[in-house]
Image (tube, rainbow, N blue to C red):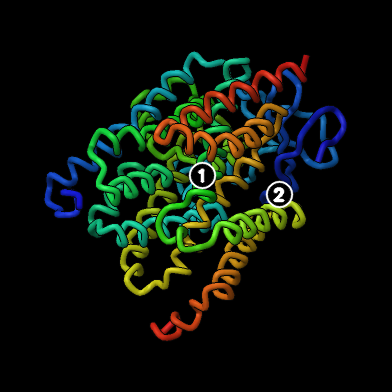
């Protein structure tokens, strides 16, 4: 969907009675904007700028305190991304049980890593009898993506005087799902409420993942293989749809295509380095082509 | 067989090092880099493209070279169900739920029809 003015609509939703359209501008200033459908070009929220205009904030946020924002954030638990994350984590728990990890180990990984690709890779490495160094290396390759993900979200979270330690704590909650949910909600909130809201989202999601891992671990003994396969299948389809939904500019879209093409090839050529190579080669190529297209 | 599976506190230390210790630093670096990272800069666009390509590569690998129970599903069925899910996502006007549900149901239906596992599932009491 490409309305006039070079905007790409990311999402349309009802928000406390009002219809909000969120889009990312395809132009160089790249800011987010929130607006009603009838006044599409009137207000733009700059990411480093002021609070969104009050008529673009959800009704509860206008006079809300920090705790209200936190509890509102925990409602992410009931949103579709969290439900899908729950089922995906169910598959992780079942997988961990298959491999032979204990209940405590399975839950411990969910709490300490809180990034399902890393958890699944770690368990897989254990299954293959890999050593500590090889396992850590494979896991860290899946975790590199958290750096840009965090770097994108943190400028939204930081208000004046925000403690570095609180940001570090909040960064533990940043994974694909928290990122998707956060990017939907945070630009609409005044800056003072955003970190608390993010913490609420994070607490809800880590609870969902931990509970699902535990349940999946218990279910694994009785779950038929075909259902376990379906649960494991949810992870890639969910990740890809997330990428498609968030891809706003040409280089983002190219990066998805290049990643899909290069990923399996790189795995065949250099297993263990495939994700790193795919990201650096495919992402750089996508960026350069996107930049030429802009010029 | 791995020592980890024997359990004990040492296994938790192992998992902590192989998991948390190699994950948390990237998040922390994201926090510190974001401080000086102009989110609308060319560097940011490049970093985002790298991140997207990496995750997209992981997605393709998980479908084409899967792990665990997904290995029991034939490749054409995995790919078909995956593409079917993406197609439904677009047809249903970018509906996350419908896209994911379609992929899951296609995989389930295809596997049941192809493998006859439905019957063995019934035998197990499902």
From the image, tell me which residue sits under label 1. Answer: B61
Q: Which mark is residue A172?
A: none
**Image quadrant in which the N terminus of chain A is located:** top right
Q: Nearer the viewer, residue A132 or A9?
A: A132
Q: In x, y percent, where is residue A217?
A: 32, 63
Quadrant of res A171:
top left
Q: Are marks 1 and 2 in contact (CB under 8 Å)?
A: no
Quick one: SS at disc 2?
A: strand
Q: How many marks?
A: 2
Q: Is residue B20 left or right of residue A144?
A: left
Q: Residues within 10 Å of mark 2 (few under 14, many from 20)?
A: few
Asked if residue B12 shows in the view, the reply is yes
Subunit ID for the residue under disc 1: B
Q: Nearer the viewer, residue A215 or B124?
A: B124
Discs 1/2, front: 1
Separation of marks 1 and 2 at Cα, in angstroms: 33 Å
Q: Is residue A48 left or right of residue A37?
A: left
Q: Which mark is residue A13?
A: 2
Name the residue at 32% across, 49% down. A123
Q: Nearer the viewer, residue A20 or B83?
A: B83
Q: In x, y percent, where is residue A253?
A: 68, 34
Residue furthest to the front in view is A269
> Relative to A193, does residue B102 appear above or below in the rendering?
below
Name the residue at 34% across, 42% down. A113
Asked if residue A17 shows in the view, the reply is no
Q: In x, y percent, where is residue A228?
A: 44, 65
Quadrant of res B105:
bottom right
């Amino acid at each position: 969907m490409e309305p006039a003015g070079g905007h790409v609509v990311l999402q349309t939703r009802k928000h406390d009675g009002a219809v909000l359209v969120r889009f990312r501008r395809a132009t160089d200033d790249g800011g987010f904007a929130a607006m009603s459908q009838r006044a599409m070009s009137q207000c733009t929220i700059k990411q480093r700028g002021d609070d969104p205009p009050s008529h673009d904030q959800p009704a509860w946020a206008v006079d809300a305190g920090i705790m209200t924002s936190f509890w509102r954030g925990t409602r992410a638990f009931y949103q579709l991304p969290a439900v899908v994350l729950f089922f995906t984590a169910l598959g992780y728990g079942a997988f961990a049980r298959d491999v032979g990890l204990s209940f405590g180990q399975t839950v411990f990984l969910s709490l300490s890593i809180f990034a399902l690709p890393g958890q699944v890779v770690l368990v897989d490495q254990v299954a293959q009898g890999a050593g500590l160094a090889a396992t850590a290396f494979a896991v860290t390759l899946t975790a590199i993506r958290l750096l840009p993900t965090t770097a994108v979200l943190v400028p939204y979270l930081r208000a004046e005087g925000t403690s570095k330690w609180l940001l570090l704590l909040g960064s533990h909650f940043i994974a694909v799902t928290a990122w998707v949910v956060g990017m939907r909600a945070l630009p609409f909130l005044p800056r003072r409420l955003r970190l608390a809201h993010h913490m609420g989202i994070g607490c809800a999601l880590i609870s969902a993942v931990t509970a699902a891992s535990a349940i999946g671990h218990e279910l694994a003994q009785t779950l038929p293989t075909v259902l376990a396969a379906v649960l494991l299948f949810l992870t890639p389809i969910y990740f890809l749809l997330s990428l498609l939904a968030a891809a706003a500019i040409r280089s983002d879209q190219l990066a998805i295509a290049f990643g899909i093409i290069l990923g399996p090839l790189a795995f065949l050529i250099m297993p263990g380095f495939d994700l790193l190579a795919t990201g650096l080669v495919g992402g750089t190529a996508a960026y350069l082509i996107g930049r030429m297209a802009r010029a | 067989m791995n020592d980890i599976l024997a359990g004990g506190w040492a296994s938790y230390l192992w998992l902590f090092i192989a998991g948390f210790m190699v994950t948390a630093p990237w998040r922390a670096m994201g926090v510190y880099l974001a401080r000086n990272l102009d989110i609308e800069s060319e560097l940011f666009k490049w970093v985002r493209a790298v991140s997207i390509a990496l995750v997209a590569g992981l997605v393709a690998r998980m479908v084409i070279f899967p792990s665990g129970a997904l290995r029991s599903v034939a490749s054409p069925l995995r790919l078909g169900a995956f593409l079917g899910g993406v197609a439904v996502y677009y047809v249903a006007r970018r509906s996350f739920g419908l896209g994911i549900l379609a992929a899951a149901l296609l995989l389930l239906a295809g596997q049941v029809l192809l493998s006859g596992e439905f019957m063995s599932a019934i035998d197990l009491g499902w």
